[in-house]
Image (cartoon, rainbow, N blue to C red):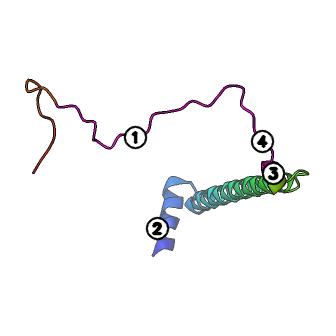
Amino acid sequence: MENSKTEKRCIDGGVDDNEEEERKVEEFFALIRSFREARNRRRDELREMEEMKKEKKKMKMSVEEKSSWTPAFRWEDFMQEIEFPTPPMIFPGPRNGKDKKKQPEDDLDLNLSL
């Protein structure tokens, strides 16, 4: 039945619908191919970028690991007497509340009690 319709269109319109339809199908598949190619290119670019980041990270780690100086403390380091240029400041000790001054009656009592 489709063949009869396309034959009627060809005879009536004078334009070969089959060729036009084939051209549209080819154009559609060309678009699909181009989308796939673009997607694959982008995927490859992202994969390369991730690999470059990993390589840079490995390079940084290898540079940090190959440090020539490793700090080490020995007991002899702490045996020397330390001389301060000025005497150390003496701070007053903590107060346990024995020296509380009584609050005047005029002030608000801010202590919470249950």
Residue farthest toward the right in the current orientation of the protein: 68
Q: Which residue is mark 1?
A: 94
On the question of residue 53 being in view, the answer is yes
Residue farthest toward the bottom in the current orientation of the protein: 1
**Disc 2 marks which amino acid?**
Lys
Which one is nearer the viewer's eye here, 70 or 41? 70
Tell me if residue 82 is in the magenta stretch. yes
- Dividing the picture into quadrants, the one containing residue 94 is top left
- The Cα atoms of the two marked residues, 1 and 2, are separated by 105 Å
**Disc 1 marks which amino acid?**
Pro
Mark found first going from the N terminus, 4 or 1 = 4
Magenta-drawn segment: 77-102
Q: Which mark is in front, 1 or 2?
A: 1
The answer to whether mark 2 and mark 4 are in CB contact below 8 A is: no
Q: Which residue is mark 2?
A: 5
Q: Where residue 51 sits: x, y (%)?
A: 77, 58
Q: Which mark is in front, 1 or 3?
A: 1
Residue at coordinates 28% horizontally, 36% vertically from top-left? Answer: 99
Q: Where residue 102 sits: x, y (%)?
A: 17, 31
Which one is nearer the viewer's eye here, 87 or 15? 87
Mark found first going from the N terminus, 1 or 3 = 3
- The Cα atoms of the two marked residues, 2 and 3, are separated by 71 Å
